[in-house]
């Protein structure tokens, strides 16, 4: 019987007749009309030899279907669109978007129209614009139009300036990215091409002569890039060839797979490749290397990802790459899915896509093309970075706006804080007050014409005069304050690495009532350590590692290669040990071997200070923990590539296990398991057992919930997984299945057939995998991995609970594990009853659970995903109305969709602020559904951090973010808004008194510069300095978290406090204007204006001073500086003041008297209130 690998390799690649070259393209927006044609198919196949085995990674889509997901995806929708044919290194038949990065929001021509439209979409800006434009009408004119235009222009120009600076920054970054240079292979030099082809090897000197340098913006579809380590990919590519730069790595490859290469070369018939010799292929194979990329800028995941060139293109010389054609699915935004094929055309001098086979007179009529499937694992998307020390050649398939990065980019989320809504409601009251006051003043005159002005004209003039009641500068001041708060947060040395990504909601940090938290990586460190292994009859904890290591040493310390069928102890002379010991030792060996092989971990070698250091790369910390454990007990992962895994004994430093990877199915959050098919090598190479054939094994590990139905019947799995979960350990079930030669060949044939389909590929592959592999696996054992709690999680949760925040933990882990973590993290208070609701499938049981919870609202609810799904589907309103009353809820086995649904439901039902915190990609939907989303930069990557409103590095930083920065931000903004509204109300009260005294004549009191100056240079700096005020220090805020609880009622900016400020403003305005008229015995004139306006400015400065709780040097500077600035500006106000009167004592005592009467009662009332009903912060300060 021929060797298995040779048989299966011969059937790996497919080729098709090329009798017609009618290629198609996708429906890209820049396609030329009439260029869609029927897609070429590959119906005829012929077995073609090649070296090495494909290392299949089916990707997330295949894995999800393989493990039971039935949801359709965008990828399948995209396949229905015409695919595109990309001719490698050639001019393309269709036009594609230029490879230009453009993140700018505006063009030079659209900036002003768009920004002005956005600004005047706000009601207040439109209102003040109409007020300013009203001054064009002579009958409505009160003062200079500039006095109304200037404040509006100031407000709008600040917003426009901010937008312009942001967009200029984006354009600069775009220009840098578009100007980055890349090496591109050129295939339009026939003489050099022939020289290389004749040599059979790619000499670096000649290869360099085929390279040109292009800027990123000049790259086109079909260009072949040469990418080196740490270089960014400028477009979406399919990897064609990868060559290692590490000579040490090449030596390891040669040593580890010498037998495999020789076996292939000895049996493989020669291929018809005139342009490349066997020697060249051997060189290419030996220097071939895996490609690792970093995708943190694309999907936020920090772990390296393995990418593979197609085996069809890997062995080709560089100059023959132009014979390739890549058929790719239409562009879509899914970064985890791709379906395509690659075809190798006949070795003609130039591969001309425009020449039909019928017209080809080159003498190659009998030569067919070879094709192979392409998946996500053969691609690298734009903005990913080559991480491995390799030279990678890749062809561009999508550019510019059609790249995954561009298609996945969505407009930034716009969140509006609760304070904004509250202020918006208050300003509506101010609008109503303005209109009411205008109508009342005209009504008091009996709606009679005044000074030749009709009553309706008088109303309009009053609306203009009282326009200051509506604080035009309120939004700008609050926006500036938010920027200050964000800077305070990011510069806080106690929470380093914190990033404010949404600057519009810092006040909401002080109003949180519900905190929804992920568990793994959020409450725990996501630093895994394998703590226990159970092999059916015996459990081994870490303290028994020596015993496990002893069994491993006895199994793998011989001089020959070990396979699963090797009897335990035969290599080390312990085969005569007691039967029980041999059985246990065999079980330990089998489970350790399974753990050492069934993973996606790859060892990488880097130099640190001149010393080579081996690191493990994987997408899951669990897998790295397991591989490190197998190394600790004596079985080390020495080498891995797409074809081979080599294990060595840590005792003898010799290779003890060598396998060829036949298929691999990765671990995903949806599948909750992974599988691998391997063939073991013996000392004689890859040989068959005389009785059972070659040793081919399918290994699988995964969560107990999915593995229970896959492994053979047993009586201990459920009990042991529950025991480990009660200890707070994450459990994985390990199983295996031996495949006969016939079984594997049947599977392989069906799997390959399904893998070449462009439509329905994923469904077909999933069906084959389920039918041939996942049945009656032998249960080997269960592992328990510990994920330690994050630093200071216990005191942090206790503080948040004391602050009145109700905490929910949403996790995908087991019920028992979640219970242990909730208790150990103090999420559940000592002695608190935990009511468990699991596996509820009928309405009666659900109703019973709800009735119990209604009568015991002080307990903690522990509910699993199945029961939660029923509650959300059948008892949605009843469940949430009860659950929000509970102090803590723990939801287990939650899907990402359920997490987001719970966050939405709480927010909509309670109308309270909901904060969600997580660290993984599966937490993104929950974070984006929350009022405030907080992401932790963790082991699972930066995806959650990038999607969040605030990014932190440790969970305990959350307490300072909420209790300190959130509380300060809310109280400061509330006080700032009150003073800005007070500033507008008081001047309108003065205007009202003046209008009444002047017999309801609609004439302005303070006009032109006085109006502008009062709202800007004379009061703005002191009022804005209130953003530096604080009522307690950080120590007291943490010591008394109950202070945070008070903010939930919104007392700092409630209707009660608002109307209190309205009364204060009316009183002070009436006193300032009325008393000035009485003391001067006049209702108008420069003397009256000088007294009342000066009293108005001083009163505002004193109001700020008595409102300050904790003085800051900037506050003192603003108050004194503004007072001096006003005094210095008085000599320039001769148009409005009687300057001769201003320098007299009479002016001084009148101003002092007016200010005293206006400010002393307010100050006295504040002192009395503090004495009789002191606020909480006064009580804790003592």
Image (tube, rainbow, N blue to C red):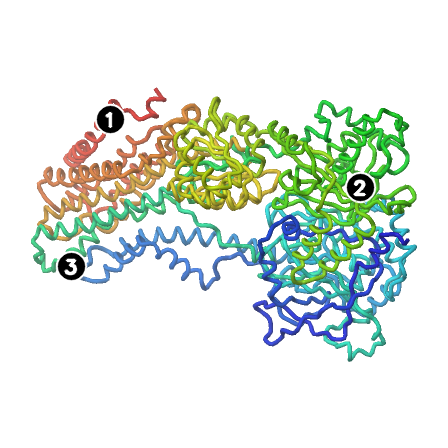
Q: From where the camera sits, is residue 223 visible?
A: yes
Q: Residue at x 77, y 29 (%)?
A: 633
User: Residue under circle 3?
Assistant: 457
- Of the image marks 3 and 1, the number of the one nearer the N terminus: 3
Q: Is mark 1 on a helix, strand or loop?
A: helix
Q: From where the camera sits, is residue 611 visible?
A: no
User: Residue under circle 2?
Assistant: 639
| Side of 973 where 266 appears, left or right | right
Label 2 to label 3, Cα distance in Å? 89 Å
How many numbered callouts? 3
Q: Residue at x 35, y 31 (%)?
A: 1046
User: For this rendering, which residue is in front, 813 or 484?
Assistant: 813
Percent x, y of residue 177: 61, 55
Label 1 to label 2, Cα distance in Å? 76 Å
Q: In which quarter of the image is the C terminus?
A: top left
Label 3 to label 1, Cα distance in Å? 45 Å
Crowding at mark 2 (Cα within 10 Å: few <14, some 14-19, many 20+)? some
User: For this rendering, which residue is in front, 162 or 914?
Assistant: 914
Question: On screen, 953 above or below 204?
Answer: above
Q: What element carries label 2?
A: strand
User: For this rendering, which residue is in front, 953 or 581?
Assistant: 581
Which marked residue is nearer to the observer: mark 2 or mark 3?
2
């Amino acid at each position: 019987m021929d060797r298995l690998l040779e048989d299966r390799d011969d059937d790996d690649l497919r080729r098709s007749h090329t009798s017609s070259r009618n290629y198609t393209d996708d429906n890209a927006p820049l396609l030329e009309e009439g260029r869609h044609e029927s897609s070429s198919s590959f119906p005829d196949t012929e077995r073609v030899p090649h070296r090495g085995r494909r290392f299949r990674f089916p990707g997330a889509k295949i894995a999800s279907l393989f493990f039971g997901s039935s949801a359709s995806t965008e990828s399948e929708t995209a396949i229905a669109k015409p695919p595109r044919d990309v001719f490698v290194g050639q001019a393309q038949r269709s036009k594609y978007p230029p490879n230009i990065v453009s993140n700018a929001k505006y063009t030079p021509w659209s900036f002003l129209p768009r920004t002005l439209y956005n600004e005047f979409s706000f009601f207040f800006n439109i209102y003040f614009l109409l007020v300013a434009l009203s001054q064009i009408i002579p009958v409505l004119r009160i003062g200079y139009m500039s006095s109304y235009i200037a404040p509006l222009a100031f407000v709008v120009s600040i917003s426009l300036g901010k937008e312009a600076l942001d967009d200029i920054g984006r354009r600069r970054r775009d220009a840098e990215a578009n100007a980055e240079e890349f090496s591109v292979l050129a295939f339009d030099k026939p003489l050099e091409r022939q020289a290389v082809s004749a040599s059979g090897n790619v000499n670096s000197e000649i290869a360099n002569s085929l390279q040109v340098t292009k800027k990123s913006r000049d790259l086109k579809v079909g260009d072949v890039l040469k990418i080196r380590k740490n270089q960014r990919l400028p477009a979406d590519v399919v990897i064609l060839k990868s060559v290692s730069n590490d000579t040490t790595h090449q030596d390891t490859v040669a040593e580890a797979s010498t037998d495999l290469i020789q076996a292939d070369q000895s049996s493989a018939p020669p291929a018809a490749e005139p342009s490349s010799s066997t020697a060249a292929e051997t060189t290419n194979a030996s220097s071939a290397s895996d490609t690792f990329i970093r995708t943190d800028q694309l999907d936020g995941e920090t772990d390296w990802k393995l990418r593979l060139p197609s085996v069809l293109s890997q062995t080709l010389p560089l100059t023959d790459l132009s014979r390739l054609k890549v058929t790719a699915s239409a562009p879509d935004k899914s970064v985890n899915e791709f379906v395509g094929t690659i075809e190798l055309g006949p070795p003609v001098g130039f591969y001309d896509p425009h020449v039909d086979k019928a017209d080809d007179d080159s003498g190659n009529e009998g030569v067919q093309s070879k094709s192979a499937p392409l998946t996500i694992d053969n691609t690298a998307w734009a903005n990913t970075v080559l991480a491995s020390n390799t030279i990678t050649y890749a062809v561009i398939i999508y550019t510019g706006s059609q790249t995954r990065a561009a298609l996945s980019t969505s407009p930034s989320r716009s969140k509006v804080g609760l304070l904004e809504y509250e202020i918006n409601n208050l300003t509506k009251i101010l609008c109503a007050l303005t209109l009411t006051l205008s109508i009342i003043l005209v009504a008091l005159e009996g709606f009679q014409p005044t000074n030749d002005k009709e009553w309706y004209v008088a109303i309009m003039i009053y609306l203009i005069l009282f326009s200051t009641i509506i604080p035009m500068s309120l939004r700008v001041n609050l926006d500036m304050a938010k920027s200050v708060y964000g800077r305070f947060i990011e510069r806080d040395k106690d929470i380093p690495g914190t990033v404010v990504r949404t600057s519009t909601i810092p006040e909401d940090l002080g109003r949180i009532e519900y905190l929804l938290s992920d568990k793994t990586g959020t409450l725990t460190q996501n630093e895994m350590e394998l703590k226990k292994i159970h092999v059916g009859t015996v459990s081994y904890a870490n303290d028994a590692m020596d015993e496990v290591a002893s069994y491993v040493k006895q199994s793998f310390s011989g001089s020959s290669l070990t396979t699963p069928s090797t009897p335990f102890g035969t290599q080390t002379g312990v085969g005569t040990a007691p039967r029980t010991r041999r059985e246990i030792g065999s079980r330990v060996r089998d489970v350790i071997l399974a753990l050492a092989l069934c993973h996606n971990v790859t060892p990488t070698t880097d130099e640190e200070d001149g010393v080579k250091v081996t690191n493990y790369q994987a997408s899951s910390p669990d897998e790295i923990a397991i591989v490190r454990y197998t190394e600790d007990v004596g079985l080390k992962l020495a080498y891995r590539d797409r074809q081979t895994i080599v294990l060595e004994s840590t005792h003898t430093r010799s290779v003890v296990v060598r396998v060829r990877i036949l298929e691999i199915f990765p671990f995903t959050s949806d599948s909750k398991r992974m599988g691998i098919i391997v063939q073991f090598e013996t000392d004689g190479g890859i040989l068959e057992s005389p009785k059972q054939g070659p040793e081919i094994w399918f290994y699988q590990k995964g969560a107990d919930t999915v593995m229970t139905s896959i492994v053979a019947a047993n009586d201990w799995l459920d009990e042991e997984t529950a025991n480990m979960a009660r200890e707070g350990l994450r459990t994985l079930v390990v199983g295996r299945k031996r495949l006969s030669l016939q079984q594997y060949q049947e599977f392989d044939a069906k799997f390959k057939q399904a893998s070449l389909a462009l439509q329905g590929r994923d469904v077909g592959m999933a069906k084959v995998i389920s039918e041939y592999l996942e049945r009656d696996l032998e249960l080997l054992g269960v592992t328990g991995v510990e994920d330690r709690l994050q630093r200071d999680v216990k005191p942090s949760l206790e503080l948040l609970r004391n602050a009145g925040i109700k905490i929910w933990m949403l996790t995908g882990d087991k019920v028992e594990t979640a219970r242990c973590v909730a208790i150990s993290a103090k999420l559940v208070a000592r002695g608190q009853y935990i009511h468990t609701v699991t596996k509820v499938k009928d309405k009666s049981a659900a109703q019973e659970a709800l009735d119990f919870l209604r009568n015991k609202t002080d307990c903690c609810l522990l509910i699993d995903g199945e029961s939660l799904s029923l509650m959300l589907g059948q008892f949605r309103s009843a469940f949430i109305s009860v659950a929000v009353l509970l102090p803590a809820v723990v939801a287990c086995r939650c899907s990402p969709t359920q997490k987001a649904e719970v966050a939405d439901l709480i927010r909509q039902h309670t109308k309270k602020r909901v904060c969600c915190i997580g660290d993984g990609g599966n937490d993104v939907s929950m974070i984006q559904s929350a009022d405030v989303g907080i992401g932790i930069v963790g082991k699972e990557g930066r995806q959650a951090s990038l999607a969040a409103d605030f990014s932190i590095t440790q969970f305990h930083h959350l307490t300072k973010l909420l209790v300190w920065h959130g509380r300060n931000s809310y109280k400061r903004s509330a006080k700032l808004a009150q003073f800005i509204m007070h500033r507008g109300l008081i001047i309108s009260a003065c205007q009202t008194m003046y209008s009444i005294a002047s017999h309801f004549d609609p004439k302005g009191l303070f006009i032109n510069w006085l109006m502008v100056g009062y709202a800007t240079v004379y009061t703005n700096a002191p009022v804005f300095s209130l953003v530096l005020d604080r009522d307690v220090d950080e120590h007291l805020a943490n010591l008394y978290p109950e202070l945070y609880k008070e903010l939930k009622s919104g007392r700092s900016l409630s209707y009660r406090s608002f109307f209190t400020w309205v009364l204060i403003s009316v009183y002070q305005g009436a006193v300032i204007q009325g008393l000035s008229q009485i003391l001067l015995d006049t209702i108008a004139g420069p003397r009256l204006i000088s007294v009342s306006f000066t009293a108005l400015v001083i009163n505002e400065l004193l109001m700020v001073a008595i409102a300050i709780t904790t003085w800051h040097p900037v506050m003192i500077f603003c108050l004194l500086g503004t007072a001096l600035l006003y005094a210095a500006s008085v000599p320039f106000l001769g148009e409005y003041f009687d300057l001769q009167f201003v320098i007299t004592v009479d002016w001084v005592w009148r101003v002092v008297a007016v200010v005293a009467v206006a400010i002393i009662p307010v100050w006295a009332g504040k002192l009395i209130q503090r004495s009789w009903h002191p606020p909480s912060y006064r009580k804790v300060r003592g």
